[in-house]
Amino acid sequence: MTDTSIRASGACLCAAALTTLALNVLVSPHLPAGPFSAIAASRVYFARQVIASAVAMALVFGLAGVRESRLAGSGRFAVVACASALAGQVLLFSIEYGQAFIVHDYALMAPAALDGAMGNPHGPLAIGAILAIAIFYLGWILLAIALLRARRIPRMSAGLLLFGFLVTPVLNGIKALGVVGGIVASLIVGAGWFLLGLRMIRMPRGDG
């Protein structure tokens, strides 16, 4: 990967950070209330998931640049961390894309069946989503630790990523916070992505 490609990957991270925050501030609050099928059938949900899919893919490109620039180091832990984060990110993209173009369609055509599938915690739909999200979070946590260990980026960037991915499930799990939890989480994680991307954009030629 060339210096230009690494800088482009950094730009992807910055764009993903800003778009994620905008998504949670401008779009998520307009999702309708009610059962999941009613939410998934809405145009707001479809638009949200299309944008979320684009963000997830931008992060895939961003992670490719992180790996090639060796900002997380070159040891075994760094390799495992980068591979885990990339795998989790690809899985998350598949979930977001599927919710936009498959789940939304089922919500329109068979809402009762969709609610039944979502209500079964042992079904393949729920298990697949849980596995993808778990690997996504674990991968980014490992990568944040690898970035801290490598010390090739400002500690604040890696620290924000680590703290953000640890606290996001807690914030999203507090129902009283509503969309505010998602906004705060995206602000913390997004700041980490943005600073990391900025470091990649500003990398001197040949550094990596």
Image: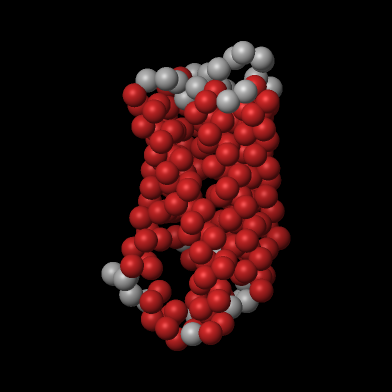
Picture quarter with the C terminus: top right
Q: Which of these two is toward me, 73 or 160?
A: 73
At 40% from the left and 61% from the top, the residue drawn is 129
Residue 182: x and y, percent?
56, 56
> Please, which residue is most extreme toward the front here?
1
Q: Which of these two is toward me, 124 or 26?
A: 124
Q: Which of these two is toward me, 142 or 88?
A: 88
> Please, which residue is most extreme toward the top here?
206
Displayed quadrant of residue 153:
top right
> Please, which residue is most extreme toward the left here?
122
Residue 23: x and y, percent?
66, 57
Q: Which of these two is toward me, 22 or 133?
A: 133
Residue 124: x and y, percent?
33, 67
Displayed quadrant of residue 38:
bottom right
The reply to whether residue 177 is visible in this rendering is no
At 37% from the left and 61% from the top, the residue drawn is 128
Picture quarter with the N terminus: top right
Quick check: 104 above or below 19?
Answer: below
Which colouring convention does the figure follow?
secondary structure
Number of numbered markers = 0
Along the horizontal axis of the image, is 168 left or right of 32?
Answer: left
At 50% from the left and 32% from the top, the residue drawn is 159
Residue 168: x and y, percent?
48, 50
Quick check: 40 above or below 141?
Answer: below
Quick check: 188 above or below 103?
Answer: above
The reply to whether residue 106 is visible in this rendering is yes
At 67% from the left and 50% from the top, the residue drawn is 19
Quick check: 202 above or below 48?
Answer: above
